[in-house]
Image: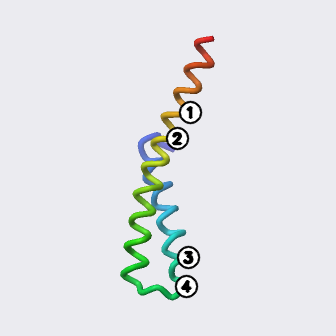
Amino acid sequence: MLKQFKPFLEGLAVGCVFISITMLFQIPLYMSFIIGALAAIGGYRNSIKMDKEKEAKKNTKSAK
């Protein structure tokens, strides 16, 4: 998988999960989409953050 494509895919997955969860609680559709979009943005940013942390940890181990 392309490294640049991974955060988009993870963000999309998180957004879809949140949309389906909010639909179970019978929240209006537009609110479910808003919550899903915000969750997708959060999942995207978290994926980038985790990749940077993983890379930093890898670099410190290889420097020792």
N-terminal of the pair, mark 2 or mark 4, is 4
Q: Which residue is mark 3?
A: 21
Q: Which residue is mark 2?
A: 50
Q: Are marks 2 and 3 in contact (CB under 8 Å)?
A: no
N-terminal of the pair, mark 3 or mark 1, is 3
Residue drawn 43% across the image and 78% down it: 32
Secondary structure, mark 3, is helix
Residue drawn 48% across the image and 74% down it: 19
Q: How far apart in space, not on screen, are marks 4 and 1 (Cα)? A: 36 Å
Question: In the rendered structure, which amino acid carries the disc numbered 4?
Answer: Phe
- Identify which residue, 30 or 5, lies in the foreground: 30
Q: Residues within 10 Å of mark 1 (few under 14, many from 20)?
A: few
Q: Is residue 53 above or below residue 34?
A: above
Question: In the rendered structure, which amino acid carries the disc numbered 3?
Answer: Ile
On the image, the x and y values in percent for residue 37 come to 39, 66
User: Which image quadrant for residue 63?
Assistant: top right
Q: Is residue 12 above or below residue 19?
A: above
Q: Are marks 4 and 1 in contact (CB under 8 Å)?
A: no
Q: How far apart in space, not on screen, are marks 4 and 3 (Cα)? A: 7 Å
Q: Which residue is mark 1?
A: 54
Q: Which residue is mark 4?
A: 25
Question: In the rendered structure, which amino acid carries the disc numbered 1?
Answer: Lys
Q: Are marks 2 and 1 in contact (CB under 8 Å)?
A: yes
Number of labels in the image equals: 4
Quarter of the figure that contains the C terminus: top right
Q: Residues within 10 Å of mark 2 (few under 14, many from 20)?
A: few
Q: How far apart in space, not on screen, are marks 3 and 1 (Cα)? A: 29 Å
Question: In the rendered structure, which amino acid carries the disc numbered 2?
Answer: Met
